[in-house]
Image (cartoon, coloured by chain):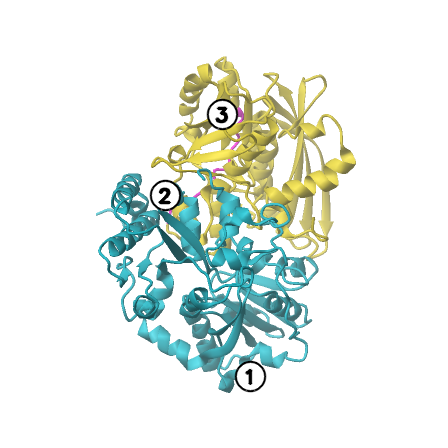
Chain colours: A cyan, B yellow
Amino acid sequence: MSELQLKDFYDGFRNPDVIGGLAKLINEEAKQLPHPINIMEVCGGHTHSIMKYGLPQLMPQNIKFIHGPGCPVCIMPKERIDHAYILSQQEDVILVTLGDMIKVPGSKGSLQDARAKGADVRFVYSPLDVLKISVENPEKKVIFFAIGFETTAPMTVALIDTVIKRGIKNIFFHINHVTVPEVMVELIDSRDEHVDSYNNRIDAFLGPSHVSVITGAKIYEKFPKEYNRPVVVSGFEPVDVMEAILMLVRQFNEQRCELEIQYKRLVSYEGNLKAQQLVEKYFEKADLFKWRGLGNIPESGYKLKNEYSELDAQIIYDAILPKEEIEDHKLCICGDILRGMANPPECTIFGTACKPSSPLGSCMVSSEGACAAYYKYGNLLK
Amino acid sequence: MTKYVTLAHGNGGEENNELISKVFYKAFENEILSKSEDAAVIHNGALAFSTDSFTVSPIFFPGGDIGKLAICGTCNDLAMMGAAPKYLTCSVIIEEGFAIRDLENIVRSMKKELEINGAIVVSGDTKVVPKGAVDKIFINTTGIGEIQQRGISSNNITQDDVILLSRDIGRHGATIFVAREGMDFGSSLQSDCASLYIQVKALMDAGIKITALRDATRGGVAAVLNEWAKQSNICIEVDEETIPVSSEVYGSCEMLGFEPLNLANEGTFVLAIPKEYAQRALEVLHQFENSSNAVAIGKVSDAYIAKVILNSSYGTKRFLDLPTGELLPRIC
């Protein structure tokens, strides 16, 4: 028997014949669509996949993608990056975060700049690597700058759990975890400042599947029920995305508006209950969380519960962390892009003043942002 | 450009190019340097001249060590200009406390690799610095080679050329990363680190006219293709599925979020060969174990000047850009 290889998990989901076959079906069935549909892929992983595999080029005229806000790096406001920057400059501090945060600029610079100037900033693949850093540097305070959606929150709380159970005294946390459903509501409900209206053009959602591995698909139940927007929880490979789009097309054609799961190989309705319990044990919702490009959104982020405040770097370092709000760049239209009102190339600073190596707006920041994906992969068929 | 040098400035991609052009080229500007070839062509086209410094960590890795890399790196740069590597210098900066036995092992692999290239070290320098001033050992080699076929240049590629690739990509970058992170894929993943002059010589001996060669080191195949597209003012169109990637490399990229096309190689090169010689060139390459899976990966067009396009087999296309950001420091 041959050994199971990693590639066995994705090979079939990138099969050109299957992608081609699904494209044919979508184009055929989309002819019956009652109206053109705009599908928002909420998650940055989907945006990256869609652009990398050129999926918009396979779509008929009446299906368009709107690239959503689901990149935890892109939406991190400058205020919070400044927190990380300032913490990293404390003499006895090692600031640890996930690799994606490295080049995101705050008002003082990026963590990459902080490190170039001598700060001890380290990037890890797994939060549990923080344990090793703390053991090797007992005289230092190790601050974990935690980022990500519901997907990575359990890894952070697993680290918190270990720190508490082992009585580790030199690991602290700056929590920046955000949640998906609240921002989806915001995109449907909120007023667009640039066009002074409540417009958005989102007809349906591709639900982020890795989030749902943890939370279950249940968190999207309200979108078909209360907001009349169908949701298909989709995997990240091109075949997954194409199949999910076909499922949405069929919902419209059959006049259904439902929550469906395409990514059945990993997502259930209830999700990972143990992980959910652990998150609830240590985290509670913050009243407001500011999203870069979108502003303050109620209950869209986590913070450490008060009883764990001795681990909370935001409380411990309260005196040195700035509180003032910083405006997004005036010419940046990320807010409109995230609402589906504009495409990245319509922005006057896209690719000129705002580039992946020097991003001004949130969508250019990481490879999962809409602007960065457009910049990197181009949009060859307009 | 930023005010301080960051690790992204050493990535072999966009930031690296910016640092070189805005700081070094600006100061040193001259006709030879501005050609941006792997090695400078001097002495009326008779000699190729190149230098490279090696800081790889870990210094011993599956498939090679810093010594082998230091000889391959400079000799390959010479070979890419159609030159036979002849004379090298070797400078080492060693950290206090470094094991003599490790040093001997490194020098032994340098000697072995020099023999493969038919080159000799004719001058050298040794510095020892206090603990912490360098990490273990850094090596610089500089080499002179005798040009065997004139006119090879990455500035001369036209639509009459096809683009060939000597082997599967990304092995060195993936190997170093896996070794450094202490990950074990339980696999045969090894660096492709190897001297390439033997293959280049065989191509020339077979009477094949070579337009351009470049070894796909830092920044990977993506960087080579983008540099060529810009230097020759052409569009390079690559069929994505023709690019060989081993399942070990693909797997580690999946886990780590890298693109095989951006990963470094140390014994893999890209060729621009006139159409009429392409088939023969592949036949020659297939005779060597290192290039037994050499393939044609694309063509030159005028669709998007100075850009590289990846075509998928299901009919979509996208730009392949220069790698940006901090890819993986100290791979060579």
| Amino acid type, residue under disc 1 in the picture | Glu
Circle 3 SS class = strand
Residue A267, percent from left and from top: 29, 63
Which amino acid type corresponds to the residue marked 3 in the rendered image? Ser
Marks 3/2: CA–CA distance = 28 Å
Residue A61, labelled with which disc?
Answer: 2
- Hey, which quadrant is residue A85 in on the image? bottom right
From the image, tell me which residue sits under label 3. B301
Name the secondary structure under disc 1: helix
In the picture, measured across the screen, residue B49 lies left or right of residue A228, that is: right
> Hey, which residue is sitting farthest bottom in the picture?
A307
Nearest the viewer among B234 and B292 is B234
CA gap, disc 2 and disc 1? 55 Å
- Residue A96 falls in image quadrant: bottom right
Q: Which residue is drawn at 59% across and 17% down?
A: B148
| Residue B186 spot, x, y in % from top left | 37, 51
Q: How many labels does the image show?
A: 3
The circle on residue A310 is 1
Q: Where is residue B31 in the image (x, y as percent from the top left)?
A: 73, 26
The prevailing secondary structure element of the residues shown in magenta is loop
Of residues B246 and B154, the one nearer the viewer is B154
Disc 3 to disc 1, C-alpha distance: 62 Å
Chain of the residue displaying label 3: B
Relative to B48, A75 lies left or right: left
Name the element at disc 2: loop
Magenta run includes residue B248: no
Residues in magenta? Answer: B187-197
